[in-house]
């Protein structure tokens, strides 16, 4: 089911004044070429994660041009502690739902841990699953120089690849947590080499996660392809947030780089409590909710 079928007919996303990425392509999907053109124009854009058709439809209609079916689904949607346990079957299922719920956003499917590190051939097999079975328009994978050969093979095969460098959450156990990356000369040079390597390999965009703002701005200026920052300051070409963090659905503390634009957890909890109270006291269902 297309999520839009169960709600009022989708209206074209309202373009923000002067933002042609949002306003110029309302009757077709955003493409990687649109993102390249936005970099040329110096136009910033927003990416959000999404893990289901309903939420994806809300973001699509809000005019978010790029949706990432992140493997953050592991800890933000599926109840795992980290992204590590997420499987290809889970990513295919979630990505297909997001594609079904959207009409104009470019949908990127994340390659989960263990689905691409073995060999470029394994990566291509799994990227093809995301494209053929889920219908995503691009994939994302973690790693800089270490993933360059894989990115090259995928892009040669016609798979648009978003690279992800800096903090790579699939390496949480090797890193001993989620530390900021790129601090100090050696680490900064490593990040710059990673960025160049993935661009050279054909990546159409690069996520920079948990990187000092000044370094992220330098990398963004040095690349021809757009950078997408998360915890990487305002100097990136685009920004991404995990939707459950951004909308206040996450329980407990969120990372310093998150801005909460809503408090959905409180709103939903309150709605559930009111519903349960009304059922208990017998005021729901009322006559207007009842068939004669
Ligand atoms: O999995 C994810 O949501 C991500 C973003 C945080 C970039 O990789």
Image (cartoon, rainbow, N blue to C red):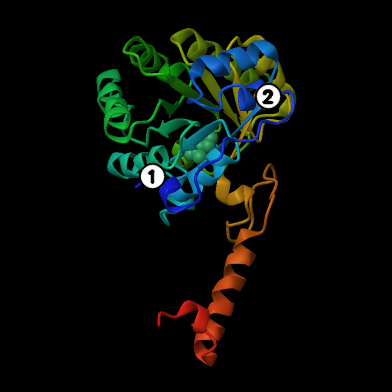
Dot 1: within a 10 Å radius of its alpha carbon, few (fewer than 14), some, or many (20 or more) residues? some
Residue 2, numbered circle? 1
Residue 202 figure quarter: top left
Q: Earlier in the sequence, mark 2 or mark 1?
A: 1
> Which residue occupies the foreground of this view, 179 or 96?
96
Give the residue drawn at x 55%, y 85%: 278
Percent of width and height locating residue 194: 53, 17
> Which residue occupies the foreground of this view, 155 or 194?
155
Is residue 282 visible to the viewer in this orientation of the structure?
yes
Residue 44 figure quarter: top right
Q: Which element carries disc 2, helix, strand or loop?
A: loop
Question: Residue at label 2?
Answer: 44
Dot 2: within a 10 Å radius of its alpha carbon, few (fewer than 14), some, or many (20 or more) residues? some
Front tag of 2 and 1? 1
> Could you tell whether 18 is left or right of 147 in the image?
right
Give the residue drawn at x 48%, y 41%: 172
Is residue 41 shown above or below 209? above
Give the residue drawn at x 74%, y 28%: 17
Residue 99, numbered circle? none
Q: Which element carries disc 1, helix, strand or loop?
A: loop
């Amino acid at each position: 089911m297309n999520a839009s079928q169960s709600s009022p007919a989708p209206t074209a996303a309202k373009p923000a004044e002067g933002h042609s990425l949002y306003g110029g392509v309302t009757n077709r999907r955003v493409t990687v070429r649109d993102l390249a053109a936005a970099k040329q124009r110096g136009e910033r854009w927003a990416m959000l994660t999404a893990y289901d058709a309903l939420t994806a439809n809300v973001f699509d209609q809000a005019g978010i041009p790029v949706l990432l079916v992140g493997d953050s689904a592991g800890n933000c949607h599926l109840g795992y502690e980290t992204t590590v346990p997420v499987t290809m079957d889970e990513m295919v299922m979630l990505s297909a739902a997001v594609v079904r719920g959207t009409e104009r956003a470019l949908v990127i499917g994340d390659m989960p841990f263990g689905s691409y590190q073995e060999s470029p051939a394994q990566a291509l097999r799994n990227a093809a699953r995301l494209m053929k079975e889920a219908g995503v328009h691009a994939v994302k994978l973690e790693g800089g120089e270490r993933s360059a050969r894989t990115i090259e093979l995928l892009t040669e095969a016609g798979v648009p690849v978003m690279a992800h460098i800096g903090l790579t959450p699939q390496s949480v156990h090797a890193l001993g947590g989620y530390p900021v990356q790129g601090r100090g000369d050696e680490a900064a040079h490593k990040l710059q080499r990673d960025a160049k390597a993935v661009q050279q390999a054909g990546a159409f965009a690069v996520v920079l996660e948990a990187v000092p703002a000044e370094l992220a701005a330098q990398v963004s200026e040095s690349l021809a392809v757009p950078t997408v920052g998360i915890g990487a300051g305002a100097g990136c070409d685009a920004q991404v947030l995990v939707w459950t963090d951004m909308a206040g659905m996450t329980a407990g503390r969120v990372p310093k780089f998150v801005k909460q634009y809503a408090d959905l957890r409180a709103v939903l909890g309150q709605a559930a409590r009111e519903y349960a109270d009304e059922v208990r006291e017998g005021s729901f269902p009322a006559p207007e909710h009842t068939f004669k």
